[in-house]
Image (spheres, helix red, strand yellow):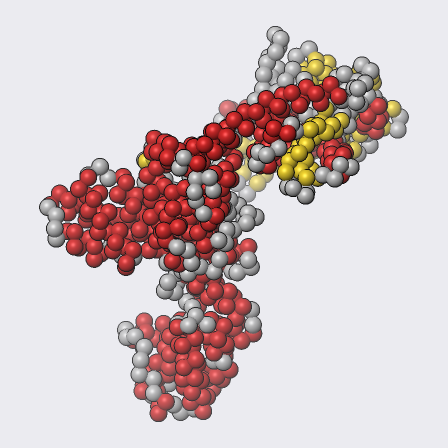
Amino acid sequence: MPDLLIELFSEEIPARMQTRASEDLKKLVTDGLVEAGLTYAGAHALSTPRRLTLAIDGLLAQSPDTREERKGPKVGAPDKAIEGFLRGAGLTRDQLEERETPKGPVYFALIEKKGRPAADIIAEVLENTIRNFPWPKSMRWGTGSLKWVRPLHSILCILSDEAGHEVVPLDVDGIASGNSTEGHRFMGSGRFSVTSFEDYETKLKANKVVLNPQDRADHIWEDAKNAAFAQGLEIVEDMGLLKEVAGLVEWPVVLMGDIADDFIALPPEVLQTSMREHQKFFSVRNPKTDRIEKFVTVANRETADNGATILAGNQKVLFARLADAKFFWENDLRVAEAGAAPWLSSLENVTFHNKLGTQGARIERIAALAAAVAPAVGADAAVAGAAARWAKADLSSEMVYEFPELQGLMGKYYAGPAGHSLDVANAALEHYSPLGPSDDVPSAPVSVAVALADKLDTLTGFWAIDEKPTGSKDPFALRRAALGVIRLVLENGLRVELDKLFDAQLLRHEISLTDDAALRVALMKDLDREIADHGVFGAAIRTLLDHFDGDLSKQLEAVKTSLPDASDDLLSFFHDRLKVYLKDQGIRHDVIDACLAMPKNDDLTLLVNRATALAAFLKTDDGENLLQGFKRANNILAQAEEKDGVEYSYGADVKFAEDDSEKALFAALDTAETAIKPAMETEDFATAMTAMASLRAPIDAFFEAVQINSDNEIIRRNRLNLLSRIRQICLSVADLNKVEG
């Protein structure tokens, strides 16, 4: 079985496209070969800035012969139907066979195809791949019609086995395939021919090209670490930058340079960001001072002066970049020391969303909500409000304008000079977190209050304007924001009533969206206070409706009817996100549904505590058997209630018990109820579940010994009411109707 080697050699491919391009080359070629009948043992794709390479091992020498029987139209069918069938089969009418079927005589075609040499199939598949390659961006050059990411220079395509190798002939817009390639642009010795993948990789290395991108990345990282270690320093880890730099060079040469003393005092994150974004440099940190003192750059060639000229040029450019950063830093510090009023006022003119107003208006809403949330998270309301007003201030700073990824971090640095406390400074940095499932969750009370308020304002805002995520689109990252709220609440053990917070913030959005000044003032003065005190709309709205004329009353009535619907829908969205989150924690969706059906399902900590206890309970034999007993009792009771047209929900009396098991169940229910009720009031779910587990044996014994539908109607009603007690006690812990099994 021969091996196939393909190389597409071009001008430099952008580093960000190389990995995806090599994967696409592998998929397109291998899928095309398999579809044509050529199977293979293995395939791997590699890339450098100037080439995409695909090596396929154990390829069939030719595709197998095929024999296909195809059923056609009935004999006597219209000529057009028969002609269409013949075209599809590639046959003539005299080659068709008539066969009898239960539905009458039918034409059948026997299509036989001879296998084709691998080279012919490869040529077709590779040409189709090149002409239809899915580059994110591509270009034309010269007079040809071929589009490629950068001008394509040559195509290497050979089949090799023990007997030798052969070129697979193909021509794409005048670029003919061959068995040769080039090495390094500057250090290579020109074009050279190859006979196999091993020969190809060896000769490339001799011509100063490391073919495997992972090998290049490993070489860069090891050399950089060793260079830093030799001077008592350490490299700041940046795997994203490492992958990018490995895609910029074919022969990596690691060089370490100095950062001028003028810039050492800049915040390390500023130095790191400036060097990474503008120069693709790695930062080198002094572990004793935690300052960035040097940098590492990666050249693409060896030089006679060991990189001194390259390093000098890089340091010159870096000096200019860092001079800009220092200018931004010093200007920002002057603004911060003066109170940062220009930053805060400028946000009044920055649009957050065309339907949700400015950043300034948004900040005021977040500050109000942060102050309301503060007591629940153990923060001072005034400090939380101040932190929320400061948290977005750095969006107007020159440093964040230049490096948006530093938002929050610069707010922390500027908070001290602006006269803010450490709590406020930390909130500026931490309120964006968590940004993802692996991101750390803030735990400082002020940071938690601002982080919750920020995310809840975003969510309620887009719900207020009815721009919610769809199945395939979430342009405003609302799912991520909801998961952030869930993690903030659960990982900090917070007890917050989300429904009340949704109501309050949806109202604030309505206030900011209305054009009626009188309505806005009325809502602000009265409804905010009512919601803060009670978490409801009703009382405040009724008070306002008594004092305003018809037009304003209608508007207030519209507020009353629309906001609760949005609040309920948003809570449902949170419950869906919570199910995904808890599924990763090993809690089944039906267990979560059983707990969602209980009161206070907007208290996520209460909800998860209940679900965790129920999940653990149902994993025990007692739990599983009790569930079956509950379902049996519930089914019998439901059938009887439907038949009789009454609800059996009270009146069970032990004096009508005939069997000892019946009397034992009465006693067990009394004992369980006595234990479960106070346990549920104190949210001691483990104790409540244990008390429920004690019902397993008496319920089992009751069903084994007693016939529910007794001929004696008094006994029957008593036993049905006893089943109702079982149902009520079990449902007081969780809605077991929702649990499967």
- Which residue lies at the image location 43% right of the left edge and 75% below the top edge? 679
74 on left or right of 189: left
12 on left or right of 219: left
- Which residue lies at the image location 74% right of the left edge and 27% below the top edge? 255
x, y percent for residue 249: 71, 25
x, y percent for residue 397: 45, 32
240 on left or right of 601: right
Q: Quadrant of the N terminus?
A: top right
Question: In the rendered picture of this protein, how many numbered marks are placed on residues?
Answer: 0
297 on left or right of 483: right
Q: Quadrant of residue 605?
A: bottom left
Location of residue 248 with respect to 655 vertically, above or below = above
Q: Quadrant of residue 619?
A: bottom right
- Which residue lies at the image location 41% right of the left edge and 35% below the top edge? 338
x, y percent for residue 440: 55, 49
x, y percent for residue 408: 48, 40
Check the image and name the residue furthest to the right.
163
Location of residue 8 with respect to 329 vertically, above or below = above
- Which residue lies at the image location 84% right of the left edge and 23% below the top edge? 206
Check the image and name the residue furthest to the left.
549
Location of residue 700 with respect to 446 vertically, above or below = below
Q: Is residue 240 visible?
A: yes
352 or 268: nearer the eye? 268
Q: Is residue 391 visible?
A: no
Location of residue 574 with respect to 468 vertically, above or below = below
331 or 602: nearer the eye? 331
